[in-house]
Image (spheres, helix red, strand yellow):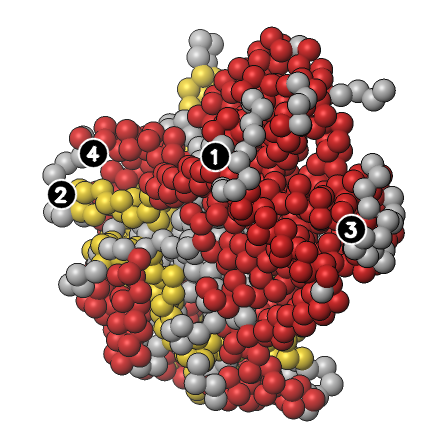
Amino acid sequence: MRFNLSEWSLRHRPLVVYFMIVLVAAGIWSYLHLGRSEDPVFTVKTMVVQAQWPGATLEETVQQLTERLERKLQETPQLDVLRSFTRPGISTIFVQLRGDTPARDVPEIWYQVRKKVDDIRGSLPVGVLGPAFNDEFGDTYGIVYAFTADGFTERELRDYVEEIRSELLRVPDAAKVNIVGAQDERIFIEFSTERIAALGLHPSTLIDAVQAQNAVRPAGVLQTGQESLSVQVGGAFRSEEELSAVTFAADGRLFRLSDIATVRRGYVDPPQPSFRFNGETAIGIAISMKEGGDIITLGRQVRQAMARITANLPVGIEPHLVADQAATVDEAVSDFLRSLWEAIAIVLAVSFLALGVRAGAVVALAIPLTLAMVFPLMMMAGIDLQRVSLGALIIALGLLVDDATTTVDVMVTRLDQGDSSESAATFAYTSLAFPMLTGTFVTWAGFLPIGFARSSAGEYTFSLFAVVGMALVTSWIVAVVFSPLQGALLLRPTKRPQATGPGAVLRAFQRVLAIALRARWITIVLTLAIFAGSILGFSFVEQEFFPASDRPELVIDLRTRQNASIYQSDQLASQLDNLLRDDPEVSRWSTNVGQGAIRFYLPLNVQMPSDAISQTIVVAKDLAARERLRQRLETALERDFPGVVSQVYPLALGPSTDWPLQYRVSGPDVTKVRALAFRVADVLGSDPRARNVNFDWIEPARVIRVNVDQDQARLLGVSSQALGAVINTVMSGVTVTQLRDDRYLIDVVVRAEAEQRVSLDTLSSLQVPISDGRTVPLVQFASFEYLQDYPVMWRHNRVPTINVMAATSSGTLPSAVDRAVQTRLVSLRKELPAGYRLETGGIAEESALSQASVLAVVPLMVLAVLTILMIQLQSFQRLFLVLSVAPLGLIGIVAGLLLSGRPLGFVAILGILSLIGMIARNAVILIDQIETERAQGAAGWDAIISATCSRFRPIMLSAAATVLGMIPIAYTVFWGPMAFAIMGGLAVATLLTLLFLPALYAVWFGIQKGVQT
């Protein structure tokens, strides 16, 4: 006789009760100590490699630096894409790994990248600085403060901010504390080229004098019989005044530096990327959390630390909260927990109404017991309470009462037939434990594509698979160990009146079932016709990768021409500040000029530093205000910011791209690539739903070329290297030494006066030293001309690539525009020359890759479902019958999405796949019940009706619990499409399981009414 868990439970009641108490206590403790976060952590599988070659042209940088690095980086294991961003003298390469790269392997791969680049460091051109590596590209700084100063200098503000940073680094859960937008100080030595030429001097004379006095060199150690004395040589600069007093001799005369140049303290010029809060100059502090920490705990710790810090700040220095992920997570988790409790209440109400008080109480107790087992498992698996795991708990609620409902229904039926409590409890295990276990694993198998999808989107949603699996398995344990004991204590035999209540519902269903069986061919054909219609209707369902976040932030990107100065970007950002300043629907905003915002939100697309960009994060009063503000800003930017590529968009949920529509044009010849990109832009712009068609780079910029007469230069003893150094010193300035000021190292920069740095006449009259000590004007052996060259070049897998990008009009999904554009691009693709490619990027590419990663696991899911079902059914015919119902859920899926107006997104696709397991579970239990009835001697017709009616209540109850339990998340942005898809699909599939499947069973096995089979 096989082991009966329910019987064991009844025989060891004190021990089982003890386990229940321990599990509940462990569940409560785990729930209180589970981490809280806004979104699941997913690994950003991108590394940034950057190197500089000062003085190189764009072509030289691409060919000699970017190309060399990329050739080596192509050897990276698990490499997906190499993207490079090259400016004259600066190469930036993004090493992007394949989506199926396990997160645990990423650190080792980044180590291999460093080793490979080190191997070729010696082959890089002389003068290359770096390469440098950034493999912490995905770090999230969830808490950001801005500090403004009224009545204080920028240096004084920075001193306070540095002290605050040191204090915040002591916060237990803080990993990194970075300063944002601070401008480094500089000491400028500015000279007039005409004046020093008239004195017979040269900038190199000034440079040599300053460097010689400020150099740090060891002066030795004096050893005596009793002690060691370090010898120190004075003269190091401690202030700009001491620097002004430097004297040097030239041509037999003694000069003071202040006599021939202006020495002043200022800030880096041109400015470094800057930061503003509500339009005021500010310095930001961004705080990231330690791995495995709790963001809510970190938020509390930071608030306590900031309260102490603020109390000691002088009047005029004010901290402002820019981003507070802790508060956002606290609110989001609270909202989801409220939805969870609402779902629990709905499921309990369904159980009590359908089963009565006593039976409903047994089912109700299964919920806290299952959750009490799930929470410790989540803690051991490192799964926090976040958007996906909490949604998974809500989805699992309806599923986790299935087994308990089945157990209780069988117990009530057996009690009504006269069995004792113990006999009824053990009978449920004997008759249905293994079909229920089969159904549990089949349901979980439906979530396999979620758990094993190797992509960023799959990693983002992994906890859905894990948490649902935990809930399903533990719910089976509860149903066969705890529920029988609770049922034996609470349930009593009940004889329900047959005229009212559930009896009437059941009799009505019996009549419908009899009609469906008698007209079984009509039932089958009608069902298949509706199914065919749903396939056609599926084409009308809109598609979306991940929806926009329901957070109140708006991101505003401004980008001007690629060779724009940071001053122009700052001016544009100031204009935007004026638009936002008096808007009543704006709560606050922060602006980054010269770079994007620091990653304060994990899915944020971080913009790389560039003088041509600014990014503003606006926090609206609420979600409705965000949408109204977005429309006003889009109109204002189009009207008031001509020549600027602007985009206004909310934060995204899950992996995303900044521009939803993107098309890559690649090829060896930049001129041809540019022409093709214009043609793609024409096609994209012809769709009225596409807005702000633009390119990541395409326009050439002016450059000044100094054409040197090399023969004349050699006669004068002037080399191109020396000439470049002279021009660089005058026009841009050269760092000659550093002033050591407290904790700071302040660069000392020698350059020409401001008026001369922006004048072409300065170049013409520039005096260049020659070999005999004299100077000659540059114009004597060089001429000047303006040329066109590209200020930047993007490459994709080592091929020059221009990205054609666009946003969509309000209310338009990118997928709809992309479908129309792809049709128009067919002819262009056919005309592409050999070696040139036109590829789709943006959301369409991300979605396709993520869906491909899911579909790649579908065969494994199908194999798992077939294997589990075959183990239980051990019949190909019955296996076919079970599987015949699963696709029919599409009828309800299409209806649910179309009626609700929700798009089919990545998460909804996961829900649709998981439906296969849910539907198969009900089907296998029904088929098993029919087979049991027939094995006990019932006629085929009677067995079908009896089994279907006996399974009617638990199947309908579990479906109602699942469908109604999703109501709290049905109208959320993230879970809504999945909820409506599952609600519609499961509702229709449940009905078909109870009508279509019996009819198909009767046809398949040739069962006739009144005929013994």
Looking at this view, is 721 or 125 the one in front? Answer: 125
C-alpha distance separating marks 3 and 2: 87 Å
The residue indicated by pointer 3 is: 941
Disc 4 marks which amino acid? Answer: Thr
Tag 1 secondary structure = helix
The residue indicated by pointer 1 is: 352
Tag 3 secondary structure = helix
Tag 2 secondary structure = loop
> Image check: 587 left or right of 991?
left
Q: Eyeballing the image, is 637 above or below 293? A: below
The residue indicated by pointer 2 is: 316
Structural crowding at the residue carrying mark 3, measured as other residues with C-alpha within 10 Å and reported as few (<14), some (14–19) or many (≥20): many
Q: Residue 253, percent across and down?
A: 28, 58
Q: Residue 238, percent across and down?
A: 28, 40
Tag 4 secondary structure = helix
Task: Name which of mark 2 and mark 1 comes first in the sequence.
Answer: 2
Task: Name which of mark 4 and mark 1 comes first in the sequence.
Answer: 4
Residue 435 at least partly seen: yes
C-alpha distance separating marks 4 and 2: 11 Å
Disc 3 marks which amino acid? Answer: Trp
C-alpha distance separating marks 3 and 1: 32 Å
Task: Name which of mark 3 and mark 4 comes first in the sequence.
Answer: 4
The residue indicated by pointer 4 is: 310
